[in-house]
């Protein structure tokens, strides 16, 4: 009952992302997550005291566990995976030993990443050694053999730095060294073209819609796309607080729309955006944000 309770609570609070999940498409694992359902299944990663730095020495074990819950797909065949890998700012060699607990014994993770029959109310403990400072991602998922079901946890990001370890649910805005396109706020590379300040002319949303239509005064020259952040209050936006919803629009147009289900029921929203440019396969963002704009919410 405890596991089911927490699965329901965490499903309600973690059903986002930008990161990965059953709503994300083409996550690099051969599955279009947007076209298949989770059939009432849920996988959560349980970590205590998130966003609070913890004392940690390189080479020590860091422990966490997953909780799974499934309403309608008990016994479905497929492969489960616990994935711990370098995200950015470090080499993959920074991930040391990864193990899971089975019958009171710690075993190599390869024994977990295998074909199983997906069951209801199953939790597992894991631990991992980080041997280099850097940023790492933790994700757990299950993909049915017939691709009829794919369920994933929300990705957690582990920042290991100067004898501390911090867990966050948001992808850190730091330079990538893994060849992926991620956001970067480090010094702009020499071959980056100038990016100006985006100017939002209007932002409009219907009351019951999850989509916000944004119109710029003009598309920015040299931009490849825009980082769009929504806030519940103007004060949060101006103080550079954590956005309520963050989306990436991967084209350079004067008018475009972004959507997220959390936007649907909001009676008041504020938005600000900034441009980004892809340089050497890295996403480098402008330091200049647009002015905060109130979203006009219609009937």
Image (spheres, rainbow, N blue to C red):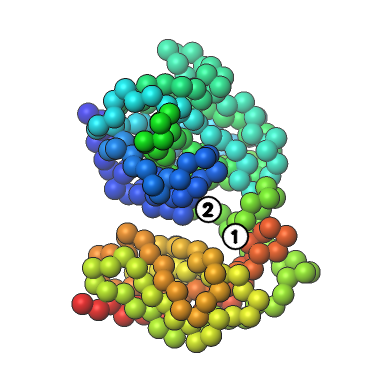
**CA gap, disc 1 and disc 2:** 9 Å
27 over 230 or under it: above or below = above
Q: Is residue 67 left or right of residue 176?
A: left
Kindly indicate whether the residue at mark 2 contacts the one at mark 1 (C-beta within 8 angstroms): yes
Q: Is 156 in front, or is 147? A: 147
Q: Residue 286, how many percent across, how many down?
A: 62, 72
Instruction: Name the residue that disc number 2 marks.
Output: 171
Instruction: Name the residue that disc number 1 marks.
Output: 183
Q: Residue 150, how many percent across, how many down?
A: 40, 38
Q: Quadrant of residue 263?
A: bottom left
Residue at 31% over, 44% down: 11
Q: Quadrant of residue 274?
A: bottom right
**Is residue 20 shown to the viewer in this render?**
no
State the mark number for residue 62.
none
Residue at 73% over, 60% down: 280
Q: Quadrant of residue 68?
A: top left
**Is residue 220 shown to the viewer in this render?**
yes
Q: Residues within 10 Å of mark 2 (few under 14, many from 20)?
A: many
Q: Is 256 in front, or is 134? A: 256
185 over 129 or under it: above or below = below
Residue at 63% over, 62% down: 283
């Amino acid at each position: 009952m405890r596991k089911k309770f927490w699965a329901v609570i965490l499903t309600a609070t973690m059903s986002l992302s930008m990161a990965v999940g059953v709503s994300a498409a083409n996550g690099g694992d051969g599955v279009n997550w947007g076209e298949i359902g989770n059939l009432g299944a849920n996988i959560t990663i349980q970590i205590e005291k998130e966003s609070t730095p913890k004392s940690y020495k390189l080479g020590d074990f860091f422990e966490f566990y997953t909780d799974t819950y499934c309403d309608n797909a008990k016994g479905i065949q497929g492969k489960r995976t616990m994935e711990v890998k370098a995200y950015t700012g470090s080499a993959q060699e920074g991930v040391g030993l990864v193990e899971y607990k089975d019958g009171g014994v710690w075993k190599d993770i390869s024994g977990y990443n295998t074909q199983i029959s997906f069951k209801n109310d199953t939790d597992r403990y894991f631990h991992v050694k980080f041997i280099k400072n850097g940023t790492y991602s933790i994700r757990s998922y299950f993909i049915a053999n017939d691709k009829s079901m794919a369920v994933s946890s929300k990705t957690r990001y582990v920042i290991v730095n100067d004898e501390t370890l911090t867990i966050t649910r948001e992808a850190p805005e730091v330079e990538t060294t893994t060849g992926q396109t991620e956001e970067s706020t480090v010094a702009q590379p020499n071959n980056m073209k100038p990016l100006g300040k985006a100017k939002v002319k209007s932002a409009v949303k219907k009351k019951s819609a999850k989509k916000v239509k944004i119109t710029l005064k003009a598309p920015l020259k040299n931009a490849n796309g825009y980082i769009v952040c929504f806030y519940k209050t103007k004060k949060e936006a101006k103080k550079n607080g954590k956005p309520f919803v963050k989306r990436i629009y991967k084209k350079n147009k004067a008018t475009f729309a972004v959507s997220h289900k959390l936007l649907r029921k909001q009676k008041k929203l504020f938005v600000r955006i900034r441009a980004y440019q892809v340089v050497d396969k890295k996403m480098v963002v402008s330091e200049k944000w647009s002015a905060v704009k109130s979203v006009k919410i219609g009937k």
